[in-house]
Structures are given as C-alpha cells and as structure tokens.
Amino acid sequence: MQLIISLIVLFLGLYTFFAPRATKLKIILFTTLCLNFASFSYVSFGTASKIVILFFFISELKHTREFFSYIRNTPFPATIWIMTAAAIIHIFTSPHINNPVTVFGFLVNDLIAKYYVIAYIFVYFQKENDLFSFVSISYLSLLIITGVGVISLITRTDPVALFSLSENGSQFINHESRQRIVSLFIYPFDYGYASLMLLLFMMYAKFNHLLDTRRFYIALGCAIFGIFFCGCRTVMVTSCVSLAIFFFFHYSLIRFGWYILLGAVAIIGAYSFSPKVQKTVDVTMTAFDPEAKMEKGGSSTLKDRTLQYLTTYDYARKNIWLGRGYRFFENDLGYNKNGDGLYSLHGKARNLLGLEGVMMRMLLERGIIGILAYCIFYILLFRYLSKLKKYSNLDASFGIATLVAFICYGNMTGELGSAIITFIFAGIYMKSAAETEYAEQYSPKSRQAYIGDININGNDHNGNIDNLSSEND
C-alpha cells in the first residue's frame, strides 16, 4: 500500500510541472487534507504534502522575478527574506546540519513547505475563479476525514495503521486515559486542528453564499466531530479562542457579547446533559489546575509548562542569541533516543518533557535571533490584515482568527503538521481582502503600478501575457 501511495504522490508532484496553476493549488490543498498521513522515511522532509509543494516550488522557479514583482507592495518580500536569513543563520550555527541532505531537508521543512506557502497562495489564488473549487475540495475532504474518523471511533482501530503507513494512530486510539481519533493524520492534534481550519473555511463559504444551509450544517457537524473526538485539550481551547477572535473583529461589541453568551449557554447545556462533553470539559480544565497530575507522555498543566520554560532558558543561556542548534533536543539531550519520548531524557532535561511549543523550541535551538524573526513574521502579517480590514472586514477577520489559532496551537502543542493548512487558508483570506482593496482604491491602470509589473489580469508593462494567477502557464 505504501508503494501505491508513493506512486500517487510522485504523480501529483510531477503533474505540477504541466498543470495550470489553479490546479496545482488544488492538488496541494487535497494532499494536505487527505494524504497528511503519508510519510516516507527515504525522504528527509517526509510527508506527501511537502513533496508536492517542493515540486510546485521547482516548477515555478522560472517565474521568480515576476513573483517578487507582484508582491513588492505587500509584507511578503520582507517575511520571505527575514525567515530565509534566519534559516541561513541557523544552518551555519547548527553542528547537526552538516551535510547537503540535512540542509536540503531543513530548507524544505522550514521555508519552502512552510513560511513561503502563504506567499504562494497570495500570488496565485484568485477569489473569483478559484474560491468555489477550493470550497468544494475542502467540503469533500472534510466528509472523507470525518468518515474515516467515525470508522476509527466505532472500531477503535486506525485505518492508516492497517495499511502499515503509520503506527502513531493506534497508540493514540488506545490511549490509557482517553480515546483520540487521528483519521487521515499522523497525530490526533492535527486532525482536530484541521477540523477547526475547515470549520472556519466552511463559515467563510457560507458568508460568501457558496454553501447552502443543509451542506453547511453537515460541514459544521463534521468539523465539530473532529474538534471534539480528536481528544485534545489544545484543540478545544484553540477553537474557542479562534472563534471568539473572529466574532470580536467581525461584529460589534454588543453582538459579540450576545454570541459569547449564546456559546456559554450552549456549553453549559451540553455539559449538563452529556457525560462525554462533561468529561471532555473536565479534562480540558485540568490544564489550568496547578495541582493536576501530568498525563503520561507530555505536559498538561501551567505548572509543568512554567518549569519547561525555566529549564529551556537554563539550557539556552549558554548561547542565548543563537541557541544550541538544530535538533539539540533530540541529538544532544536524547529525546526519544530509546523510542520512549521524554523518558529517554535524563537529569534536569526531564523537565523539558516533550518540549511542546514553538517559542520554547525556538529559544532552545535558535535563541533570541530565531524568536525575533518568528515574531516579526507574524507582526507584519497582522499589520497587513489590519490595513486590509477596512476594505474587507470579513476576509481580514477570518485571516486574523486563522493566524491566532495557529500561534495558540503552535505554542500549546507544537506546530506538528499544521503549518501548511494554516498558511493555505490565511493566504486565501489575505488575497481576497487585497483584491477588494485593489477594486475599491485603484483604477485598472493605477492598480498595475501598485501591485507590480504584472497586474491581476495578466498584462505586464510591455503588453505581454504572463499572468501569475491565471489558469494557464
């Protein structure tokens, strides 16, 4: 079965050299949602979605000049150069990045299939031409991953493990304290987080009249199933924060207050009448109890997390500006050396537990320089969304909610496999808002000068057709 999946991924990757750009983006979206479980040990950067994105990146290298011309008045040139510079510094200061294979895998994981993705979507996505098909693919993918999740819940088995593609799911499904569904993902956290991203996108589709009421409620039920039955407190908290952020930015304070009140009533009602909901809420709230016991295999309380940060700083202060280098946690401290996660750690390193959280790992391995690059990246994006909000409140609000969700999730559990799906949808919201800005503020002629040498309709200053967002190359 793994050979078949490998051939499918290889075909999809090679097809990006011949497919129209819109089709390429759809392939990336579908691969990210439905082939997330496919990980290949013979590739240094692993997952199917990253392999497809790498092929996409290579296929578009010939358009690099036009690409940067298109985004020159957006924050993306700055975000690209900042994260690229930070990555290069990390390569030269990390003793474990010491051969071409490791360097290549790191660049794919950290740049090409991560921080660059939001810029790809911003340039190549067109709301008028692509949004409906993106909604259709997302809706279908949501039905697929929910169907697999339901089968897992009923049978208490991991369908992916049955095909010998990953054993992680079985470990989570049969967890001693609570059952966690992984669906078509490697981790249950990512299944729940993907369900949240799809929930937001289905809401966005409903606002844009691309989903009828019946299909919207089906999508709503599927997304809530994933958020709830992934069994992860982080996803529950992130979902509440993200939805609250969206309603806060999109509606007036009075209306926001009513939505919060209705949400609280719904949660109280579900807690009172559903033992499953009651158990889930109780387990979630233990994260804020300083006396709660840590769940085996990870950090669960604020007390544990505080100890993690203090221990991280203690290790990082030996090279506070640049950190201790790539994979210091695994290669030098020995995390999962014997295949048993944090139990391979010794001495004070045991306080690091699973080193959950982006900022924590950044401080340990990349130091203050890495943290500054990380913060500047998101500051620039939020600043741009704030500017776009006056042109499209809906798009900007969804974009802000998506990025806030990712930051919360990444610093509570770690980013795991959530970066690509986040930057795909965040890029869609930002591009849609930017198109509204262009339509309202600029005439077709001045719009061309504003966004660069290539305008949205595909004519450059010399009258040549070279449309970065078009269906054809």
Image (tube, rainbow, N blue to C red):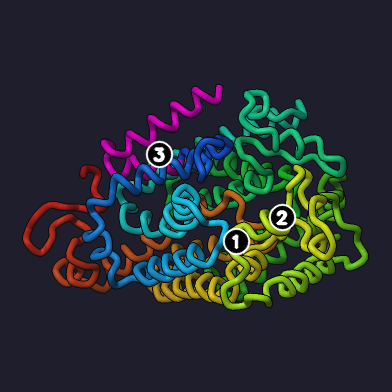
Instruction: Specify whether 448 is left or right of 213.
Output: left
Q: Which residue is mark 3?
A: 27
Q: Which residue is mark 1?
A: 405
- Of label 2 and label 1, which has the lower sequence position? 2
CA–CA distance in space, label 3 to label 2:
29 Å
Looking at the rendered structure, the kind of residue marked 1 is Ala
Instruction: Specify whether 73 is left or right of 374.
Output: left
The reply to whether residue 285 is visible in this rendering is no
Q: Is 18 one of the magenta-colored residues?
A: yes
Residue at screen point 17% across, 65% down: 453
The stretch of residues the image draws in magenta is: 1-29
Q: Residue furthest left?
A: 462
**Labelled pair 3, 1 in contact (Cβ < 8 Å):** no
Residue at screen point 34% across, 42% down: 24
x and y, in percent, of residue 213 in the image: 53, 43
Asked where in the image residue 134 lies, by quadrant, the reply is top left
Residue at screen point 34% across, 34% down: 14
CA–CA distance in space, label 2 to label 1:
11 Å
